[in-house]
Amino acid sequence: MRIACAVDHAGFTLKALALDVIRKEGHEPVDLGTHDTTPVDYPDTARAAATAIREGRADRALIICGSGAGVAVAACKFPGIRAAVAHDTYTAHQAVEHDDVNVLCLGGRVVGPAYAEEIMRAFLCARFSGADRHIRRLAKMNAIEAEFSS
């Protein structure tokens, strides 16, 4: 898979680790910045990752800001993007297996590098289960998205 990696200044400390984990798990990283700790706005970071997925340049994304919350909210504004904050491995893999999440959001000020690596691996190794109940629930979410899209 091609995995977009987008971070803001608060997530920059985990960026090199994220790119390394993506490579070690056998995926192709798509580096969307930022490239230093100069302040940037997290909605721009989320936009970069969401756009890469929507345009087919990436299959999934890792987005890292200070808490993970801001980029998750911003990313979910884009049709077809299912982003989740996961600060534990269970949520990271279950979000993909049950909810077909395509964007993992992490807080660079919340989790340390060792645990962030485990969380990233859980997300990258997970696959959507395709179970009937999950397909039914995804269809309902897609219907909600379509209902409110202009």
Image: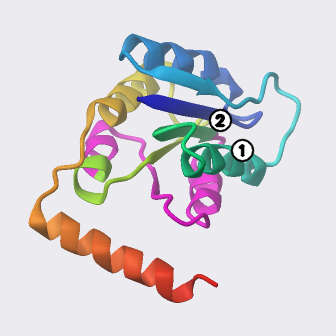
Please give the label number shown on residue 119: none
Q: Residue furthest left?
A: 132
Q: Which comes before the other along the chain, label 1 or label 2? A: 2
Q: Quadrant of residue 6?
A: top right
CB contact under 8 Å: marks 1 and 2: yes
Residue 42 image position (x, y, % from top left): 74, 48
Residue 17 image position (x, y, % from top left): 54, 16
Q: Is residue 99 above or below residue 2?
A: below
Q: Quadrant of residue 36?
A: top right
Quadrant location of the C terminus in the rendered image? bottom right
The magenta stretch spans residue 9: no
In the image, which residues are magenta? 65-94
The magenta stretch spans residue 70: yes
Residue type of the residue flagged with mark 1: Thr
- Residue under label 1, please give it: 45
- Residue under label 2, please give it: 6
Q: Residue furthest right?
A: 38
Q: Quadrant of residue 73?
A: bottom right
At a point 61% along the width and 50% down the height, the residue shown is 50
Q: Between 47 and 41, which is closer to the camera in this rendering?
A: 47
At a point 74% along the width and 29% down the height, the residue shown is 33
Quadrant location of the N terminus in the rendered image? top left
Residue 72 image position (x, y, % from top left): 56, 55
Q: Is residue 58 above or below residue 96?
A: above
Q: Secondary structure at mark 1?
A: helix
Residue 44 image position (x, y, % from top left): 77, 49
Q: Is residue 70 above or below residue 139?
A: above
